[in-house]
Image (cartoon, rainbow, N blue to C red):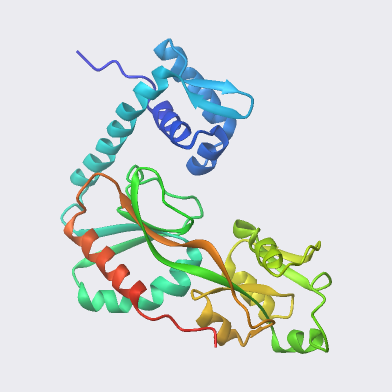
Amino acid sequence: MGFQLPPLASLRLFEAAARLRSFKTAADELGVTPSAVSHGIGGLEEWLGTPLFLRDGRRLSLTQAGEDFLPHVAEGLSMIASGARRVSPWQGERRVHVSVAPTFARLWLLPRLIGFRGLQTGIRLHIDTSHRQAVLPLEGMDAAIRMGTGPWPASHSELLFRETLLPVASPDHARSVAGPGDLDWASLPLVRVTSVEHDWDTWLQSQGLDISPNTALHVDVVHLALQAAANGLGVALCRLPLCTDMCKDLGLQPLTAAPVEIPTGYWLTVPDGREPRREVDAFCRWVRDEASQPMPSSE
């Protein structure tokens, strides 16, 4: 007798929406539309014969049935992902799958990986830099390095380092706005990064500047903002210590001597409640060791 299973695709939609308490956020994470999430969960509720969510305007919460159902679904999906790895034709390889923010991968991880290869020659790394935050361990990722305030649900998170913000510009642009007295921040063209758009607001507020800034350009990743500043398109925020070397390589100059510390940082996360494989543990130990090394200053 076969298993009587609900539509399997709807289980993944339910798990994401229940964990994130949002159809829209779940849709963004899974790369589908909020309507698809809503319809999929509606079909699952119809199959089960009971509501799983309480929908109260913008608030979304689980019913008691949803609370009872969630751990079974999460565990089942995790077991499927683990089983798929075990029967994969590459199972014999020592592989580590890591989800990493694109800027972190380019500016911090890749320049250091030659050192990891020298220490761990038998481990093959698979690095995913998609903007969508991978779900651990449901999407086959062994670890992730995430930017934010942490921690994250269903994972063990440890801070690698926090960041500070420093406005920078090209030498020509810096000279053109320099002069006696304070800078006119309301008139300066700012370059904003869409994924961390509130960085500029945080920095301006820290300086006691209650102004409506002049945003000249939006880009989607930090290193493009720095490149835009180097090309004279505006003032960007250098995230120290991550972007220190890139700012120096591009010849960017600080417009103030006072970096502002922010609560966000980079975190190493692994799935909670399980002992990592030896190769995953080796990678995580190497990341911790590298992050503990003195970082270049902004001087």
- In this view of the protein, which residue sits in the foreground, 96 or 89? 96
Find the residue positioned furthest to the top. Answer: 49
Q: Is residue 189 left or right of residue 122?
A: right
How many numbered tags mark residues here? 0
Where is the C terminus found, in terms of image quarters?
Answer: bottom right
Question: At x 44% / y 19%, what residue is drawn?
Answer: 44
Question: At x 34% / y 74%, what residue is drawn?
Answer: 292
- In this view of the protein, which residue sits in the foreground, 194 or 33? 194
The vertical placement of 70 against 31, above or below, is above
The quadrant holding residue 38 is: top right
Question: At x 62% / y 29%, what residue is drawn?
Answer: 58
Q: Is residue 206 left or right of residue 49?
A: right
Q: Is residue 217 left or right of residue 262?
A: right
Q: Is residue 129 left or right of residue 209?
A: left
Residue 205 coordinates in the image, percent (x, y): 70, 64
The vertical placement of 210 against 230, above or below, is above
Find the residue positioned furthest to the front. Answer: 208
- In this view of the protein, which residue sits in the foreground, 129 or 93? 129
Where is the N terminus found, in terms of image quarters?
Answer: top left
The quadrant holding residue 125 is: bottom left
Residue 267 coordinates in the image, percent (x, y): 40, 60
- In this view of the protein, which residue sits in the foreground, 120 or 284? 284
The vertical placement of 283 against 117, above or below, is above
Residue 94 coordinates in the image, percent (x, y): 19, 60
Residue 250 coordinates in the image, percent (x, y): 60, 85
The vertical placement of 215 against 74, above or below, is below
Question: At x 70% / y 68%, what residue is drawn?
Answer: 191
